[in-house]
Image: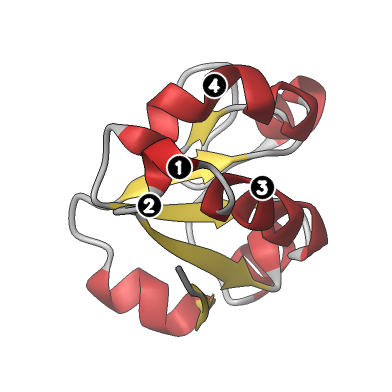
Amino acid sequence: MTIQEVAVEVFAQSRDDAVVIDVRETSEYQDGHIPGAINIPLSTVPDNVHLFAQHGSVYVVCQAGSRSMRACEYIAAQAECANVALFNLAGGTGAWIVNGYEVVTGDQPN
């Protein structure tokens, strides 16, 4: 399985109903996240592989792109996720904000 890196501009134009998983810590997520993003902190990814496996495509995001890439690499190595297309959001939430896209606060996706 390959992990594709996607620029925030490309993601913003084509996201539709894409599943977005934010692997930042809960406090970071609550301070501002991409609308619709589900919070699964990186340390809990191994306990939540089934949530990734439920979807055909998953966009993974963190603050800058490195934690989300680690999450993608872990998920890509799991047999139950063999059919999941993984996309790492380049530049993460930081790039999302710098490019002027909307964020929501709180502990809910929207």
What's the amino acid at mark 3? Tyr
In the image, 36: left or right of 39?
left
Q: Is residue 44 visible?
A: yes
Q: Which residue is mark 4?
A: 48
What's the amino acid at mark 1? Ala
Camera-near label (4 vs 2) is 2
Residue 16 position within the rendered picture, expressed as x and y whole percent measured from the top left = 19, 59
In the image, 107: left or right of 2?
right
Residue for point 74% across, 37% down: 24
Q: Is residue 46 above or below residue 97?
A: above
- Report, in whole angstroms, how far the alpha carbon at label 4 lies from the one at label 1: 14 Å
- Report, in whole angstroms, how far the alpha carbon at label 2 lies from the one at label 3: 12 Å
Residue for point 39% across, 73% down: 11
Mark with earlier residue (3, 1)? 3
Q: Which residue is mark 3?
A: 74
Residue for point 80% across, 23% down: 27
Residue 8 position within the rendered picture, expressed as x and y whole percent measured from the top left = 51, 75
- Report, in whole angstroms, how far the alpha carbon at label 3 lies from the one at label 1: 11 Å
Residue 75 position within the rendered picture, expressed as x and y whole percent measured from the top left = 56, 46
Determine contact: label 1, label 2, CB under 8 Å: yes
Mark with earlier residue (2, 3)? 3
Camera-near label (4 vs 1) is 1
Query: Which quadrant of the rendered structure holds the C terminus?
Result: top left
Q: Which residue is mark 1?
A: 79
Determine contact: label 4, label 1, CB under 8 Å: no
In what element is the residue under mark 4?
helix
What's the amino acid at mark 2? Ala
Which label is found at residue 82?
Answer: 2
In what element is the residue under mark 3?
helix
Farthest left residue in view = 16
